[in-house]
Image (tube, helix red, strand yellow):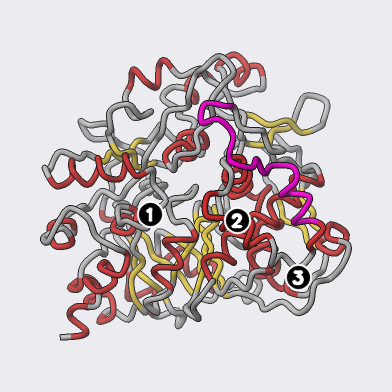
């Protein structure tokens, strides 16, 4: 549900029902800057900025990006600083403020629980982003796409406004060479802004083995787990063992990839099941197996409070209702190397011709990989950037084949795609889970439904 699909509106709608509403914490700096450049319809961003605990910093962000009445829909958005081991001060400030705004708006007007989801893969953004969410009082931090071994310690440090650092893997680093992203909240903001509550950490894992690895040491132990199956939307774990694909080019998962739920239950930490869990029977089965509940994404991604561009959302609902919506698990699409679910929609980057016609560039850079340059120093590369640039930086041509720019495509899917000076507009890219059977029930009284309808559907058995 990354990059604005699980926005503050959706998280707030879910939290108002008493369930955990989760905002995506990916690329919130870009989304905030572009919403302000759109004129901030409804004044929501500016309302949250007025509650930021250091007003002068919030004002700096507003002055830099806000365009009264909104810029032209075809105007290019002003860029934001790209992430690095030493991100520019404004880039760190923007990340803090943007995560505060999203969580603050999600928590507005109710006392339900709110969480924020990050990708472990994007270590460069994590410290500043988490701190911003904590300033807004976030209740849970969820993290997948890697093992969040250092996040418990990070949360402890940030709760005390202490300087923190997070290890960043650098491809080609020599033995004994370590790299970190450092973050000092007091130095950045100029003050320690009151007491902070440490949020609970839920690690998103794909196997009992990974859950056990994290749980065995108090330094790495999270407060719970989300146990995710391969049918869940977005990124999924690679199959264990040698990768094989079926006739459609999708990864084949075998017995070794089955979730060992009893083993996770035996760890004694709360856990939720994810991936194809949209149904009261699935919820009942999860609870019977010892789970605290289920995590649901796709059903909410298609509800009316979703952050998806409205035309895209309605088109997908229509095609899914006709049984024509196909979601493929693409082993090449994501620059991360993880399989990634792509909805096969025309006029999106899922279309091979649209993908081929898109100019290759990497101007957002969230999924760039740090690498060691010859002679030392750190550079950044992404398989979705121009092939010759990627190869010049030490990457291989094979890694670039089929690689999509997820950053730009997912931002475009929520209606905030970049327009280039030459008139080219970024096409969207949409991800969903592969189990869409729930739609028959949710749309039985019409083609549209709300987040509350999803919750009612899930809890139907418990209420009967």
State if disc 1 and disc 3 touch (CB < 8 Å): no
Which quadrant of the view contains residue 338? top left
* Sequence order check, earlier mark of 3 and 1: 3
Q: Is residue 389 left or right of residue 318?
A: right
Q: Residue at x 24, y 64 (%)?
A: 278
Q: Is residue 316 above or below residue 364?
A: below
Question: Which residue is tagged 3?
Answer: 157
Asked if the stretch drawn in magenta spans residue 73, the answer is: yes
Q: Residue at x 54, y 71 (%)?
A: 108
Q: Residue at x 82, y 68 (%)?
A: 162
Q: Is residue 321 left or right of residue 238?
A: left
Q: Is residue 321 above or below residue 140?
A: above
Question: Which numbered disc covers residue 45?
Answer: 2
Q: Residue at x 62, y 45 (%)?
A: 36
What is the secondary structure assignment of the residue under circle 2? Answer: helix
Q: Which residues are magenta?
A: 57-75
* Sequence order check, earlier mark of 2 and 3: 2
What is the secondary structure assignment of the residue under circle 3? Answer: helix
Question: Which residue is tagged 1?
Answer: 306
Point out residue 194 in the picture as x, y percentages from the top left corner. Answer: 79, 77
Q: CA distance from mark 2 to mark 3?
A: 28 Å
Q: Is residue 9 above or below residue 410?
A: below
């Amino acid at each position: 549900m990354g990059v604005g699909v699980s926005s503050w509106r959706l998280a707030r709608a879910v939290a108002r029902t008493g369930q955990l509403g989760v905002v995506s914490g990916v690329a919130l700096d870009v989304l905030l800057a572009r919403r302000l450049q759109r004129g901030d319809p409804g004044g929501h961003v500016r309302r949250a900025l007025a509650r930021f605990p250091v007003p002068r910093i919030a004002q700096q962000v507003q002055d830099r990006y806000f365009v009264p009445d909104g810029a032209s829909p075809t105007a290019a958005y002003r860029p934001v600083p790209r992430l690095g081991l030493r991100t520019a001060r404004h880039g760190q400030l923007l990340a803090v403020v943007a995560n505060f705004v999203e969580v603050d708006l999600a928590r507005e007007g109710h006392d339900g629980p709110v969480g924020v989801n990050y990708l472990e893969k994007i270590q460069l953004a994590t410290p500043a982003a988490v701190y911003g969410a904590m300033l807004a009082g976030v209740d849970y931090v969820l993290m997948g796409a890697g093992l969040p071994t250092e996040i418990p310690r990070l949360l402890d440090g940030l709760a005390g406004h202490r300087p923190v650092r997070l290890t960043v893997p650098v491809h080609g680093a020599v033995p004994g060479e370590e790299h970190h992203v450092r973050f000092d909240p007091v130095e950045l903001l100029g003050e320690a802004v009151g007491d902070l509550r440490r949020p609970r950490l839920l690690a998103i894992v794909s196997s009992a083995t990974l859950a056990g690895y994290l749980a065995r040491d108090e330094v790495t132990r999270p407060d719970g787990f989300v146990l995710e199956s391969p049918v869940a939307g977005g990124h999924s774990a690679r199959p264990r063992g040698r990768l094989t694909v079926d006739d459609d080019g999708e990864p084949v998962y075998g017995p070794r990839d089955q979730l060992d739920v009893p083993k996770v239950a035996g760890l004694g930490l709360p856990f939720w099941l994810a991936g194809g869990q949209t149904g009261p029977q699935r919820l009942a089965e999860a609870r019977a197996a010892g789970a605290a509940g289920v995590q649901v994404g796709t059903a909410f991604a298609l509800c009316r409070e979703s952050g998806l561009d409205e035309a895209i959302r309605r088109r997908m609902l229509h095609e899914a209702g006709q049984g024509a919506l196909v979601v493929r698990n693409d082993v090449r699409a994501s620059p991360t190397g993880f399989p990634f679910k792509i909805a096969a929609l025309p006029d999106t980057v899922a279309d091979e011709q649209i993908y081929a016609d898109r100019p290759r560039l990497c101007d957002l850079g969230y999924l760039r990989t740090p690498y060691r340059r010859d002679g030392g120093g750190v550079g950044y590369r992404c398989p979705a950037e121009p092939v010759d640039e990627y190869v010049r930086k030490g990457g291989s041509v094979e890694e670039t084949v089929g690689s999509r720019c997820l950053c730009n495509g997912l931002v475009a899917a929520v209606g905030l795609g970049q327009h280039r000076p030459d008139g080219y507009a970024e096409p969207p890219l949409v991800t969903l889970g592969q189990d869409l059977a729930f739609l028959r029930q949710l749309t039985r009284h019409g083609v549209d439904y709300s987040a509350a309808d999803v919750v009612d559907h899930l809890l139907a058995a418990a209420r009967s």
